[in-house]
Image (spheres, coloured by chain):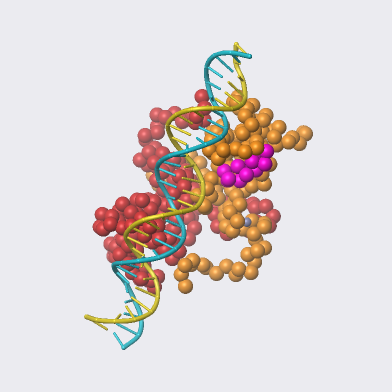
Chain colours: A red, B orange, C yellow, D cyan
Amino acid sequence: MMPRLPIDQAETMIRAAGARVTRARIEMLAALLAAEHALTHHEVEKRVNRAHAIDRVTVYRVLEWLTANELAHKIAGSDRVWRFGATNKEHARQHAHFECNRCGAMICLDEPDTKPHIRLPSGFHAQEVDLLTKGLCAKCAPARRKDRRRRSVPGWT
Amino acid sequence: MMPRLPIDQAETMIRAAGARVTRARIEMLAALLAAEHALTHHEVEKRVNRAHAIDRVTVYRVLEWLTANELAHKIAGSDRVWRFGATNKEHARQHAHFECNRCGAMICLDEPDTKPHIRLPSGFHAQEVDLLTKGLCAKCAPARRKDRRRRSVPGWT
DNA sequence: GCAAAATATGCAACTCAGTTGCATATACAC
DNA sequence: GTGTATATGCAACTGAGTTGCATATTTTGC
Ligand SMILES: [Zn+2]
Ligand SMILES: [Zn+2]
Ligand SMILES: [Zn+2]
Ligand SMILES: [Zn+2]
């Protein structure tokens, strides 16, 4: 299988969705496909702006459109900012995520891993399970070695 | 064991933390203890206001303080709003949560349940795992019976 | 290709959660 | 009670995400 340029792959995916093929959609999906981690609206905006200026509202709307069409998915982070990842090949419909407690980076974990069976109160009906592992990413883990992580109670002496 | 009023239990918990016992802290923690689900800042404000008016900034600050002192914990919801629950007796330090896809209600699940073992990329270091089950709560499940949940692609016909 | 219809984009103004600085009120130690 | 540390109230701010509407671009039909 030929490795394809993200920009071409993006165009094919959008065309396959049977929707209008616009520059913003292509470039934004390509940015997500090329990204090493899930991107915030701002990160997407910055990466696409290398090519040409794009309005921030368009960024929000295209991300929403990509998500609705299942070409991307969004993950809720601890900082109340959505991060978006391309929904391609290897990622199952359901997959876990990792968020770095230090730099905030969010990545998709493609391991299907053992599904935890959760007992719900009577009458409740489960539809999906979000699994978010938090910790330190490869870049941040070394930096925290010396921190000697005591059970911190911020703002309290 | 005597069943205690939330207000008394709250005061005891705060006093045990060795901190100043204020009306706002007691009433807000009592509201969390009495709540049937995790509360937003706004819900807390509304419940406490039955007794006396309270500034919204104080609500934020007290919730932050309760969280820092581990008398409460906060859960990130799909609507970018933090919800707070009292951290009492039965809830372990780590527990799963449930969020209703229809009404947004968030509850704590005290089942410790089978911890999923997640494989991380090399160099990554896990510290905690957030597990959020989404679906329909007991109140909303019946209402959705007829909806015949097709694979929805919102905003796309 | 060209015009018309359909829809995506840009812009301005908005909403709403959460934060910050500072003056004042309150809890607690003495 | 008085003094000191700190909690609260108020006003103004930040930043993510949304909405309405005018304009630009993509498609479709010719
Ligand atoms: Zn990191
Ligand atoms: Zn993902
Ligand atoms: Zn519900
Ligand atoms: Zn909880």
In this view, the residue in front, B154 or A55, is A55
The residue located at (34%, 51%) in the rendering is: A43
Residue B119 visible to the viewer: no
- Find residue B65 and report its image quarter: top right
Residue A20 visible to the viewer: yes
Q: Give the x, y percent position of residue A49.
A: 28, 55
Q: Give the x, y percent position of residue C29.
A: 60, 15
Image side of residue A84 versus residue B39, left or right = left
Q: Quadrant of the N terminus of chain A?
A: bottom left
The residue located at (67%, 57%) in the rendering is: B139
Number of numbered markers: 0
Q: Is residue A102 above or below residue A69?
A: above
Q: Is residue B18 above or below residue A9?
A: above
The residue located at (61%, 34%) in the rendering is: B24
Most extreme residue toward the right is: B2
In this view, the residue in front, A67 or B10, is B10
The residue located at (50%, 29%) in the rendering is: A155
Does the segment drawn in magenta span residue B49? yes
Q: Give the x, y percent position of residue B9.
A: 69, 33
Does the segment drawn in magenta span residue A92? no
Q: Is residue B145 above or below residue B88?
A: below
Q: Could you tell me what secondary structure mostly forms the magenta stretch?
A: helix
Q: Which stretch appears magenta? A: B40-51
- Find residue B62 and report its image quarter: top right
Q: Give the x, y percent position of residue A93.
A: 48, 60
Image side of residue A146 versus residue B70, left or right = left
